Image (cartoon, rainbow, N blue to C red):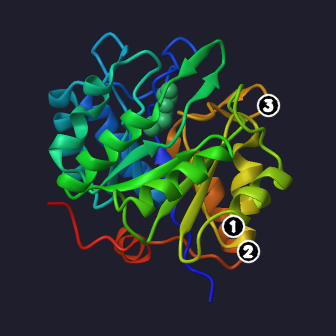
Amino acid sequence: MTQPLIITAALVGAEVTLAECPHLPITADQIGQAAAEACQAGASIIHLHVRTPEGQPTQDQETFRRAIEAIRARCDAIVQVSTGGAVGMTAQERLQPVYLKPEMATLTTGSVNFGEEIFANPWSLIQEFARAMQEHGVKPELEIFDAGMIANALRLRDKRLISEPLHFDLVLGVPGGMPATVRNLVYLVEGLPAGATWSVAGIGRAQTQMAAVAIAMGGHARVGFEDNIYYRRGELAQNNAQLVARVARIAAELNRPVATPAEARRILGLRGGPA
Ligand code: KMH
Ligand code: ZN
C-alpha cells in the first residue's frame, strides 16, 4: 500500500537572498509563522536553516534554538536542522544545531560542486557528523546530490554509524550535481537499500515536476524557498505554504493523502514527538 506523502518544507535555505525573495522568513517569529502556514498546507517536516538579523546564513546554536521554539509553539512538525549550512563553513560551525537534539538533521554523504563553489564533505567529516547524530539521538536525512553519495551512506550503515530504516533526500538540479531528470531520479531510487524511505528536492523550475514524479513513484517530496522561489515562470511565490499547497493538491489528485506529523514520524521510524 502506498504511504501517505511526507512533504518537507525547506523554508529558508542558505543561498537565497532577501533581495531575490522578499518573502523569505528571517527572524524566529517569521520562521515560526512560515512553518505554521506550511504545516497547515500539508507539510510534516520543516527543513531548517537560520539567518542573522541581517539575513546572512549562520549555524549559531542560539539562533537555531529560538527558531525551533518558535516552530514548536505553533505546530507539531518534525524539525530537521541543516548541518550543510552554507558553503565554506567549518565542520564545528555546521554541527552546532545537532547538540540541540532535534528529531532530524541533514547529513550529506559526499562533496559536490555547488555553482562556482565546492560543498565540501570529506569522509572524516561525514563520519564525525554521523557519530554526533548517533550520540544525540538525531535521525539523519541522507542528502544525495550525486550517485556516489549513496555508496558512502551504505558505508556508514555498514560501519554502524547510522541505522536502518534509512531516509534519503535526493537533491536534483544543483549546478554541479545530478540534473533533475526522471531518468536520474529512477536511477538513484533503484540504488537505495530495501526498506529505505526517500524524498526528492528538485531545484528551481524542477521542483514541482520532481515532486509530481515522486508522488507517482511512492516517494516523498520537498519544496520551499531554499530550492525554488517561483510559483511559476516570472512570478515569485508569495510564501512557502503556496508551494506546499500545490504539491498537496497534486497528491490528492493522485490518491496520496498528505501525512500528518504523527504519520510522518511512524513512516520514518521516529520514536515520538520532540524531546
Ligand atoms: N546550503 C548548502 C551548501 C543541507 O541543508 O544539509 C547545503 C545544504 C544542505 O543546504
Ligand atoms: Zn538545506
Q: In which quarter of the image is residue 49?
A: top left
Give amino acid for label 2.
Leu
**Label 1: element kind:** helix
Q: Position of residue 116 (x, y in %)?
A: 65, 12
Q: Distance between the residues labelled 2 and 3?
A: 24 Å
Give above or below for 93 relative to 48. above
Question: Mark 2–mark 1 contact, CB under 8 Å?
Answer: yes
Query: As rendered, which of 151 and 257 lies closer to the eye?
Result: 151
How many marks are shown on the rendered structure? 3
Tell me which residue sits at (37%, 13%) in the image: 56
Q: Position of residue 154 (x, y in %)?
A: 52, 59
**Label 3: element kind:** loop
Give amino acid for label 1.
Ile
Q: Where is residue 93 in the image (x, y as percent from the top left)?
A: 27, 23
Nearer the observer, disc 2 or disc 1?
1
The residue identified by callout 2 is: 254
Tag 1 or tag 2, which sits nearer the N-term? 1
The residue identified by callout 3 is: 233
Q: Position of residue 261 (x, y in %)?
A: 37, 68
Q: How far apart are marks 1 and 3 (CA)?
A: 22 Å
The residue identified by callout 1 is: 215
Give amino acid for label 3.
Arg
Q: Distance between the residues labelled 2 and 1?
A: 8 Å
Question: Mark 2–mark 3 contact, CB under 8 Å?
Answer: no
Query: As rendered, which of 218 and 165 lies closer to the eye?
Result: 165
Q: Quadrant of the C terminus?
A: bottom left
Q: Residues within 10 Å of mark 1 (few under 14, many from 20)?
A: many
